[in-house]
Amino acid sequence: MAIKLEWSEEALEDIESIATYIEKDSPTYAKSVVSKFFEQAEIIKKFTELGRKVPELGDTNIREIFVYSYRLIYKIDSNTVLFVAVVHGKRLLENHEKSITKHST
């Protein structure tokens, strides 16, 4: 069965905000970072359990990998990987927990 990739509106907004912030100093680096998020998504499509379980949540179906200094957080369902948030590694996840867990029902 083929795995389908999906992106939540929140995750796409996170990426857009990150790109806008980085673009102020380096448009080239901003494009590189954004590309890396989508490249990693394709790898996760093949190896869904590649990322670690998000420590704050304790749900084995919600995992994360680091892309540069950002946490790319995703939820695994039977045939879907849903990317739910992209959070800087130094920021508190609690600000995003509501949007992450809303996709867990």
Image (cartoon, helix red, strand yellow):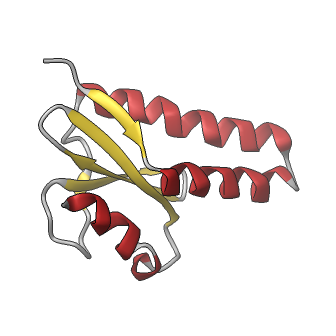
Depth order, front residue of 10/36: 10
Quarter of the picture holding the N terminus: top left
Depth order, front residue of 89/9: 9
Furthest toward the top, the residue is 1
Depth order, front residue of 95/52: 95
Quarter of the picture holding the C terminus: bottom left
- Give the image quarter of residue 27: top right
Q: Report x, y in % for residue 51.
A: 27, 48
Q: Report x, y in % for residue 79.
A: 17, 31
Q: Residue at x 32, y 54 (%)?
A: 64
Task: Indicate whether 87 appears above or below 35.
Answer: below
Query: On the rendered structure, is 48 left or right of 17?
Result: left
Q: Report x, y in % for residue 68.
A: 54, 51
Count of labels shown? 0
- Give the image quarter of residue 25: bottom right
Task: Indicate whether 2 appears above or below 47.
Answer: above
Q: Residue at x 26, y 54 (%)?
A: 63
Query: On the rendered structure, is 15 left or right of 45?
Result: right
Query: On the rendered structure, is 82 left or right of 57?
Result: right
Task: Indicate whether 103 appears above or below 79.
Answer: below
Q: Residue at x 35, y 32 (%)?
A: 5
